[in-house]
Image (spheres, rainbow, N blue to C red):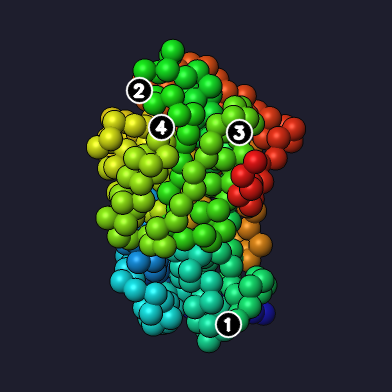
Amino acid sequence: MRRPYLRGKYGWFVQITLLLSLVAMVLSACGGSSNGGNNSNSGNTAAPIKVSLVTDIGGLNDNGFNHLSYVGYTKARKELNFDERVIQSTSQNDYVSNLTQAAQAADLVFAVGFLMQTPIYQVAKQFPNKKFAIIDGCATAPGKFDCTNLPNVAPLFFKEQEAGCLVGAMAGQMELDGKSKLPKLSGSNTISAVGGQAIPPVNHYIAGYKYCAQKVDPQVKVVVGFSQDFANVAKCKDLALTQIDQHKSDIVFQVAGGCGIGALDAANQKGVYGIGVDADQGYLHSNVITSALKRVDTAVYSTIVNFSKNQYTNTPPVFDLKQDGVGYATPSSDVPADAKAKADEFAQMIKSGTLTPPADIPADK
């Protein structure tokens, strides 16, 4: 006959004590106690991501794509709670060292600007386990011109020609309306563009601007010049003054980053119209009638969020008008209704595929 478990004077007491001890052990193992639960949760919390941003020489105060990059970066940083790591370049000689420093401190590095194509190629090859993204460019081997499809570099491209087309259509319609509707116009039927350097993103903007202005008004003359600078305000101002004084330009489109602020200053000084670039620059002067928008902030923000979700890709889509990657800023009260309507008409044509602005600046007729 089996003996009862723990018989005796204190048998039942011992059994209950053992049972309670067993329950406590189980609860502890499952995180049932308050202390155990907190320790378990804190141990599973993922560390914040590390993201660096390297600007080009225009800096964060260029009122353009460097600033917009920082806007998207800051939005993601506040959402995802990572530390700020921003490096501003003061010359092109800084690019490689700045990108290297950024890669040493972060897991995702943004290079802002076409001129960093070769530097990002060099640094990304040195840090194959880090991820990179470049605004307006791609990884390009030294001495080469074509993109190299590195697995850890995401090229963030935009169809600037579509944004340029919309402001060009607006400008073309205003010239077509002439002095009868817009007394500020000189009657020269001439508009102009001030570019920084003849690099693809700049050329795209100007190509769309010229093509669509002349599509609206085949007789409009489009004067194009390059300052060879993206930071020196005086250079762009001098170039714009030449376009206004010698060629009688009624509307000046700046495509030169921080340098281009000088072009808008010149337009304001001479009492002609100006068109901003990348961001809405209407706040600079009352004569800035609109701006060709490139939503760099959206590209930076979405790339960081995707990275945080382990969805980084080195083949992101091109940001175009269909996905709201480019556009134009709300026109000022100086823009007549028919000019805004023309820009909207061209936008619908682009979206439907019936109008494709060129990427290369059309030759003079």
Frontmost residue, 267 versus 41: 267
Quadrant assignment for the C terminus? top right
Q: Which mark is residue 250?
A: 4
Residue at x-position 63% and y-position 78%: 144
How many angstroms separate mark 1 from mark 4 (CA)? 42 Å
How many angstroms separate mark 1 from mark 3 (CA)? 38 Å
How many angstroms separate mark 4 from mark 2 (CA)? 8 Å
Q: Are marks 4 and 2 in contact (CB under 8 Å)?
A: yes
Q: Which residue is mark 2?
A: 184
Q: Which residue is mark 3?
A: 214
Q: Are marks 3 and 2 in contact (CB under 8 Å)?
A: no
Q: Which residue is mark 1?
A: 142
Residue at x-position 27% and y-position 55%: 234
Point out the frontmost of discs 1 and 4.
Answer: 4
Secondary structure under tag 3 reads helix
Asked if residue 282 lies left or right of residue 278, the reply is: left
How many angstroms separate mark 3 from mark 4 (CA)? 15 Å
* On screen, residue 321 above or below 238: above
- For the question of whether residue 65 can be seen, the reply is no
Secondary structure under tag 1 reads loop
Q: Earlier in the sequence, mark 1 or mark 3?
A: 1
Point out the frontmost of discs 1 and 3.
Answer: 3
Q: Earlier in the sequence, mark 4 or mark 2?
A: 2
How many angstroms separate mark 3 from mark 2 (CA)? 20 Å
Instruction: Give the amino acid type for the residue marked by disc 3 in the picture.
Output: Gln
* On screen, residue 168 above or below 133: above
Q: Position of residue 214 (x, y in %)?
A: 60, 33
Instruction: Give the amino acid type for the residue marked by disc 2 in the picture.
Output: Lys
Q: Residue furthest front?
A: 246
